[in-house]
Image (cartoon, rainbow, N blue to C red):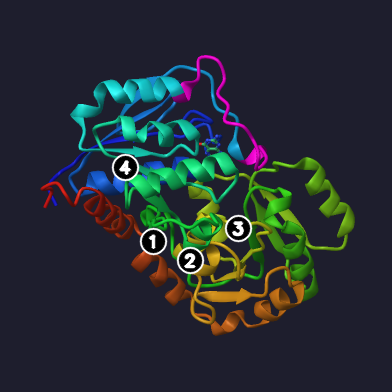
Amino acid sequence: MRSLKLLFVSTSVGALGSGLGGGVELTLRNLAIALHQRGHSVTVVAPDGSKLESFSLVEIVGNLQTTAQSQGREAPITMPSNPVIGNLWSYVRQVQSCYDLILNFAYDWLPFYLTPFFTTPIAHLVSMGSLSDAMDQAILDVADSFPNTIAVHSHAQAQTFEMGFTYFNLQNGLDLSQYQFCLEAGDFLAWVGRIAPEKGLEDAVQAAAQTGLPLKIFGVIQDAAYWQQIQTDYPQAAMEWMGFLSTQELQKALGPAQALLMTPKWVEAFGNVAIEALACGVPVIAYRRGGPAEIIQSGYSGWLVEPDSVEELVQAIHKIPQISRTICHREAEMHYSLAALGDRAEAWFKLILQNEAID
Ligand code: HBI
């Protein structure tokens, strides 16, 4: 495939490196690295204050968007005065002819609405499941008019958009060179994620307590009241909050875990923490729900259990010795490396640009 000139347009809820952009920041960086490694040129345009090592970054001023997941299904389409999302796409329109393909990472109405007005093709990586009727319709309109230009991270995420549309399942990927394979297991269980109700931490605490294994908890305390309630409800549980660690520190502390517990109450679009655990050789025990259920092969790289069943979590914890940590590590290498992500991204771009000579 010939070298493409790619323009990445970042999420609109925060500057890159601020953490406000959540999983999308990691995805954007990993995709840029994967595609750069294959000889494509990547330019990133993002809100003012963004940081992204070793890529040309264009910073755009303006007021950030309100996070889509904090709105309701009937939420109207809104933008603040001097919206950064509007300024981002005004810049993109001016420079579009310098690029072969534009990749949108924002979960906002404007980029989807503007798609037919652009001459350079726009590919959209949808970062979350269905959240509002307005966004569903905007995504559907683009999927209908521009086949293959919508990508998601899992089939489960795509299925949350009831109306159904053709999509490309990009899944996700990590820079595995940052994760150390840890063959010997220690004597604790792990849980990683934002400490918030949709992540179901209370189930992991109950399950761990029933097995007598301590639970190490990693992640930002997003909902302090929720965290306080868990400590009040389960005073006997051997659990320890390890803080919100950098990738380097997280993988070091996570490596010796007997297993990672994933207890999502909502449909996780993907579940990056599942592939971080596999990369370290840590089996994953997860509810059969959302992205993690498409990453973990039950009995092979971990165990998938009936959603919301603490009892089945406990049974799976007793079956951890049946899982090979070497196989967990190899699963990450095979499907979730930057090379694997780059393969999928190129296949997606080929589908979009198939009418143009890019081979
Ligand atoms: N909300 N309005 C809006 N726009 C985004 O781009 C967006 C968001 N919420 C979350 C989000 N992006 C990212 O954190 C994804 O990683 C989920």
The residue drawn where x is 70% and y is 48% is 195
Q: Amino acid at mark 3?
A: Val
Camera-side residue: 321 or 135?
135
Quarter of the rendering containing residue 145: top left
**Bounds of the magenta segment:** 69-85
Q: Secondary structure at mark 4?
A: helix
Mark 2 neighbour class, 10 Å CA radius: few under 14, some 14 to 19, many 20 or more = many
The residue singled out by tag 1 in the image is 336
59 shown above or below 348: above
The extreme top residue here reads 82
Q: For residue 82: magenta?
A: yes
Query: Marks 4 and 2: which is nearer the front?
Result: 4
Mark 3 neighbour class, 10 Å CA radius: few under 14, some 14 to 19, many 20 or more = many
Q: Secondary structure at mark 3?
A: loop
Labelled pair 2, 1 in contact (Cβ < 8 Å): yes
Cα–Cα span, label 2 and label 3:
20 Å
Residue 22 seen from this side: no
Q: Position of residue 7 (x, y in %)?
A: 29, 34
Label 1 vs 3, first from the N-terminus: 3
Mark 4 neighbour class, 10 Å CA radius: few under 14, some 14 to 19, many 20 or more = many
Labelled pair 4, 2 in contact (Cβ < 8 Å): no
Q: Secondary structure at mark 1?
A: loop
Labelled pair 2, 3 in contact (Cβ < 8 Å): no
The residue singled out by tag 2 in the image is 278
236 shown above or below 316: above
Mark 1 neighbour class, 10 Å CA radius: few under 14, some 14 to 19, many 20 or more = many
The residue singled out by tag 3 in the image is 267
The residue singled out by tag 4 in the image is 32
Label 2 vs 1, first from the N-terminus: 2
Q: Secondary structure at mark 2?
A: helix
